[in-house]
Image (tube, rainbow, N blue to C red):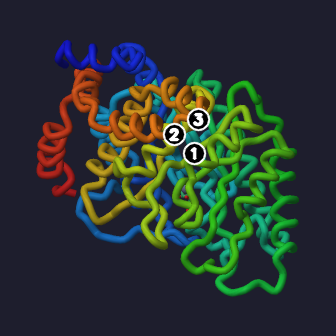
């Protein structure tokens, strides 16, 4: 990085070293499911529950060995502090029934994470399973179905607690369910009250150690096949989380296309001490495209920085694309998250706030536009060097090589 770059940012009151240190300690939870199209190790067949991966790019990881090999490769190109986000379907060893998946099935993952200094997060997998009856799980009219998934989630609390305890990094268990209806419901409140009751039973089912883990709930506006109604809507979970002292997870792909998701962050921090995220990229009706460094992502990163949210949030990524090299997709999306955070950390928010508070909206506009062309790219290169990582273009070359040598031979 040229000396000049440091001076330019300093002239706006920005300390590059401080920004890079903050960025390096901001944890990003990498979703393992990008590497295998959300298939898992259970041999469950197809992905169900209103989510889909499309494409059949060669080289999909098919088991623990292949997945961790690809993960190691991806990790070696992703700077900063990292965690791995797992789903119940990534259980290892002798496969057990979904409702019985517990700490024993995740010992191997704990060893993997320990050896690499990584944290782990967990998600009960409430899709791709025959006990999802008529697309319903925790809100099902059938008590047997509800109890099945309640048990699955209670076991999940034990797994997540183990992650937090064993790895010394606070772990998150996030609950997302696909429950909903294709057409206009006859009864909207029934399923919601059943979901509320099921969630209460989960939280009462095991007294987890709040010092080592958190629980979150993830809403969604609609899904494939559940176009008219989702039981776990935004209002439902926001109220649930607020009244039960748990976290509300914002998946940035789960809102109406014209809603500004970033705007929710400050509103939520006005009431919650901590937030959780699945950072994703919605495209029309689909919510899970690989992160691009676009305005939406920048907006989210800016708000996280301005709200002092970096150490008060679980930042997880959530996208799955089977039409391109999966390892490259994981790295490019994660690097974009880091780039957006870096740009946010290099922005003179104090000057912008000052201008807004003194009614100088012309100054706000001028400054917002002026800073867009500051040489942040050189700071990114500097960050990669300090983290011992290669440039974006070199990364691509090396992943192409990995594709030839490893992925295409599968
Ligand atoms: C689905 C949700 C959910 C999943 C993952 C696999 O719309 O976003 O979080 O993507 O848990
Ligand atoms: Zn999500």
Q: Nearer the viewer, residue 148 or 208?
A: 208
Badge 2, how many Cα within 10 Å: few under 14, some, many 20+? Answer: few
- Structural distance between the alpha carbons of marks 3 and 2: 6 Å
Q: Which mark is residue 359?
A: 3
Q: Is mark 1 within 8 Å of ligand 2?
A: no
Whether the residues at callouts 3 and 2 have beta carbons within 8 Å, the answer is yes
Looking at this view, is 288 or 371 the one in front? Answer: 371
- The Cα–Cα distance between marks 1 and 3, rounded to whole angstroms, is 33 Å
Look at the numbered disc 2 and give the secondary structure of its residue: helix
Q: CA distance from mark 1 to mark 2?
A: 31 Å
Q: Residue at x 44, y 41 (%)?
A: 365
Residue under label 2, please give it.
Answer: 361
Which label sits in the foreground, 1 or 2? Answer: 2
Instruction: Using the rendered image of the protein, determine whether residue 45 is visible from the camera's viewpoint.
Output: no
Residue 275 x %, y %: 65, 39
Left or right: 297 as drawn, with respect to 330: right
Q: Which residue sits at x=75%, y=55%?
A: 237
Question: Does 75 appear above or below 191?
Answer: above
């Amino acid at each position: 990085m040229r000396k000049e770059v440091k001076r330019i940012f300093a002239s706006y009151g920005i300390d590059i070293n401080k920004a890079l240190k903050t960025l390096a300690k901001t944890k990003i939870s990498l979703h393992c499911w990008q590497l295998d199209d959300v298939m898992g190790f259970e041999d469950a067949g197809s992905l169900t529950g209103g989510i889909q991966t499309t494409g059949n790019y060669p080289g999909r990881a098919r088991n623990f060995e292949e997945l961790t090999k690809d993960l190691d490769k991806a990790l070696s190109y992703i700077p900063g502090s990292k965690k791995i986000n797992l789903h119940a379907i990534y259980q290892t060893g002798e496969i057990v029934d979904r409702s019985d998946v517990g700490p024993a099935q995740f010992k191997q993952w704990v060893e993997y994470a320990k050896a690499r200094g990584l944290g782990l997060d967990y998600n009960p997998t409430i899709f791709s399973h025959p006990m999802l009856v008529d697309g319903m799980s925790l809100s099902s009219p059938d008590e047997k179905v509800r109890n099945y998934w309640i048990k699955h989630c209670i076991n999940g609390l034990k797994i997540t607690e183990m992650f937090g305890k064993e790895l010394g990094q606070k772990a998150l268990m996030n609950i997302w369910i696909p429950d909903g209806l294709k057409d206009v419901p006859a009864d909207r409140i029934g399923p919601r009250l059943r979901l509320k009751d099921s969630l209460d039973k989960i939280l009462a089912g095991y007294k987890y150690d709040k010092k080592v883990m958190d629980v979150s709930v993830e809403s969604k506006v609609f899904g494939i096949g559940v176009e008219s109604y989702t039981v776990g809507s935004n209002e439902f979970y926001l109220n649930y989380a607020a009244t039960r002292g748990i976290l509300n997870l914002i998946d940035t792909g789960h809102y109406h296309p014209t809603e500004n998701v970033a705007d929710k962050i400050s509103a939520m921090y006005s009431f919650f001490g901590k937030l959780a995220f699945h950072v994703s990229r919605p495209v029309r009706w689909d919510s899970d495209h690989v992160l691009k460094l676009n305005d939406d992502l920048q907006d989210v990163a800016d708000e996280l920085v301005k709200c002092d949210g970096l150490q008060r949030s679980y930042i997880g990524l959530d996208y799955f694309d089977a039409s391109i090299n999966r390892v490259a997709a994981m790295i490019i999306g994660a690097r974009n998250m880091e780039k957006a955070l870096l740009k946010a950390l290099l922005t003179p928010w104090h000057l912008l706030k000052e201008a807004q508070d003194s009614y100088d909206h012309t100054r706000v506009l001028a400054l917002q536009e002026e800073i867009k062309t500051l040489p942040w790219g050189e700071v990114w290169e500097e960050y990669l060097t300090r983290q011992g990582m290669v440039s974006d273009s070199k990364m691509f070359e090396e992943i192409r090589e990995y594709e030839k040598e490893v992925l295409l031979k599968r």
